[in-house]
Amino acid sequence: MFRSTAVRFSAPGNLKIFSDAKSAKFLAAAAKAASLPSFENNPPEIGRANVGKSTLLNAVLGRNGLVHTSKQAGCTRTLNFYGVGPQPHKLVLVDAPGYGGRGRPEWGAVFNHYTKHRKKLKRIYILINSSHGVKEVDWVMLETLNRLCEESMQTERPITLQAILTKADTISTSSKGIPQLQQEIFEAAPLCLPAVVTSVSKKMELGVGETRRSILEACGLGRVDSKVIHS
Ligand SMILES: Nc1nc2c(ncn2[C@@H]2O[C@H](COP(=O)(O)OP(=O)(O)OP(=O)(O)O)[C@@H](O)[C@H]2O)c(=O)[nH]1
Ligand SMILES: [Mg+2]
């Protein structure tokens, strides 16, 4: 269980902002979410469909089944916000729909709008399947996010980017090794922070504590982490 006196991951309120609707409605909702004043820190998770975004979020929140997951790609279709701790939330985690074959242009439009306009955005996590490696769509997304981070450095809203290599329990001998994947990520996105390697399965749990620490550090809550987080 991930516990903290100031940041309680075990009792989040699920703030579902978007519904699956036409693009215009999506964008209006994205604009609304981007200007919500009570959201302090919003690190969103992005990645190809089925990479394990929602599963990792459940693990990070210490709440099995809170975030809907599925074997079928394209499960998450909206940006979902999970407030952590008492109101007003110091931390809000954001689960995003996947990109790639099962993604939809309007989902991308919402994500782009959100990342461009959300004032309190601190860090974006890009999740990549360890055993599939860096696909072309991942490469394009890494380059795009690297540009976004670079541009943000000139503003009062610097955004950092970090990779998460998921499903480490499924790495086989034919998969590329983690150091090689890391190298490819750096080539596409030199600003990307070193990847956290995770696995959330019955076989192996790995990297969940490290992901939590990274989120707290990204949001300037790092001191809370070192004192009172138990993972
Ligand atoms: N073996 C293994 N399976 C995992 C892991 N993480 C997630 N899965 C499985 O992968 C499938 C997809 O997980 P989700 O968390 O729904 O993936 P997602 O990225 O949110 O997918 P979309 O919402 O469709 O974009 C589910 O069947 C999960 O149980 C992992 O670390 N190891
Ligand atoms: Mg999902």
Image (tube, rainbow, N blue to C red):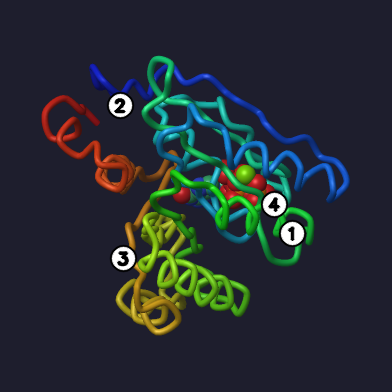
Q: Is residue 83 above or below residue 146?
A: above
Give coordinates of residue 12: x percent, y percent.
47, 21
Q: Circle 2 sits on which residue?
A: 2
Whichever of labels 4 and 3 marks the residue nearer the N terminus, that label is 4
Q: Circle 3 sits on which residue?
A: 193
Tell whether circle 2 marks a residue whose Cβ is less than 8 angstroms from ligand 1: no
**Residue toward you, 16 or 115:** 115
Disc 4 vs disc 2: which is toward the camera?
4
Give SS at disc 3: strand
Give coordinates of residue 155: x percent, y percent.
39, 62
Give SS at disc 4: helix
* Quarter-of-image position of residue 47: bottom right
Q: Which residue corresponds to the image point at 30% horizontal and 26% vertical from the top-left?
A: 2
Q: Which residue corresponds to the image point at 53% horizontal and 40% vertical from the top-left?
A: 94
Q: Circle 1 sits on which residue?
A: 103
Q: Is residue 191 above or below residue 220?
A: below
Disc 1 vs disc 4: which is toward the camera?
4
The mark found on residue 110 in the picture is 4
Tell whether circle 1 marks a residue whose Cβ is less than 8 angstroms from ligand 1: yes
**Residue toward you, 146 or 29:** 29
